[in-house]
Amino acid sequence: MARRKLAAGNWKMNGTRAALAEAEALAAACPAPGCDVLLCPPATLIAAMAERLRGGPVRVGGQDCHPAPSGAHTGDIAAEMLADAGAVAVIVGHSERRADHGETDALVRAKAEAAWRAGLTAIICVGETEAQRDAGKALEVVGAQLDGSVPDGPTPERLVIAYEPVWAIGSGRTPTLEDIAQVHEFMRARLAARFGDALADGVRLLYGGSVKPGNAAQIFGVPNVDGGLVGGASLKAADFAPIVEAAST
Ligand SMILES: O=C[C@H](O)COP(=O)(O)O
């Protein structure tokens, strides 16, 4: 089936209100993109960015959420709060959160369930470390993360998987196109085995890790790659607009 590609930008812990101009510049640079476009700024910017981009081609997402809808969790943000601020999606299980905050697959799964409860699309991240790839365990690791992090009851609209090899993030290094193809084919088959062909055929599988304007078209042309989750190159409209263009079909 034809899946509309998704170009998602993860600003990570970058950007103050001055950076909202970049989001507006991106929207102006791609007024009618041939793909879905999402920016995930720091939580402090979500409401303002959603307000400024309202009605335009660029949607807004969060970078994390807490499993609970409210409560005594100082510093955390509920999925419902993201939705209330104007987000339509949330990244969960990014490797930086898995590493920095010790997030387990079970916690990531609970966060994805929270996203769905709030009406958000969950972008669930998986990916092996360099040591795991060198040990020939990339598929095993990704398979286990998928099994443990994806809740029951997904739909193609509310589930996105991002394959991000940890060693490719922010490093300027990327897997070979063959390796990307292998992992993405594996992930779709793994989803099909658990949820059936219709779900697996509809879910978008993103690649993330050093996607740049110069390599985006090649990577997005790999079978089963339905767009990208982009970090550094999503911060400036001048970099992200050509990536959006590469995802537009
Ligand atoms: O979420 C985005 C990824 O971690 C990729 O980051 P990067 O494009 O800076 O390598």
Image (tube, grey):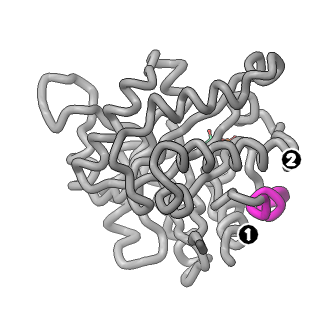
Q: What is the span of residues highlighted in magenta in the rendered image?
A: 213-222
Three-letter amino acid code at disc 2? Glu
Q: Earlier in the sequence, mark 1 or mark 2?
A: 2
Q: Is residue 64 left or right of residue 207?
A: left
Question: In this rendering, is residue 112 above or below 48?
Answer: above
Residue at 62%, 31% in the rendered image: 142
Q: CA distance from mark 1 to mark 2?
A: 19 Å
Residue designated by label 1 = 246
Residue designated by label 2 = 178
Residue at 80%, 22% in the rendered image: 136
Q: In the image, residue 130 lies at what x, y percent?
A: 77, 22
**Callout 1 crowding tier (Cα within 10 Å): few <14, some 14–19, many ≥20:** many
**Which element is circle 1 on?**
helix
Locate the C terminus by quadrant.
Answer: bottom right
Examine the structure image and report whether residue 148 is included in the region drawn in magenta: no
Q: In the image, residue 28 lies at what x, y percent?
A: 55, 78
25 or 221: nearer the viewer:
221
Q: Is residue 149 left or right of residue 134?
A: left
The answer to whether the residues at label 1 and label 2 have Cβ atoms under 8 Å apart is no
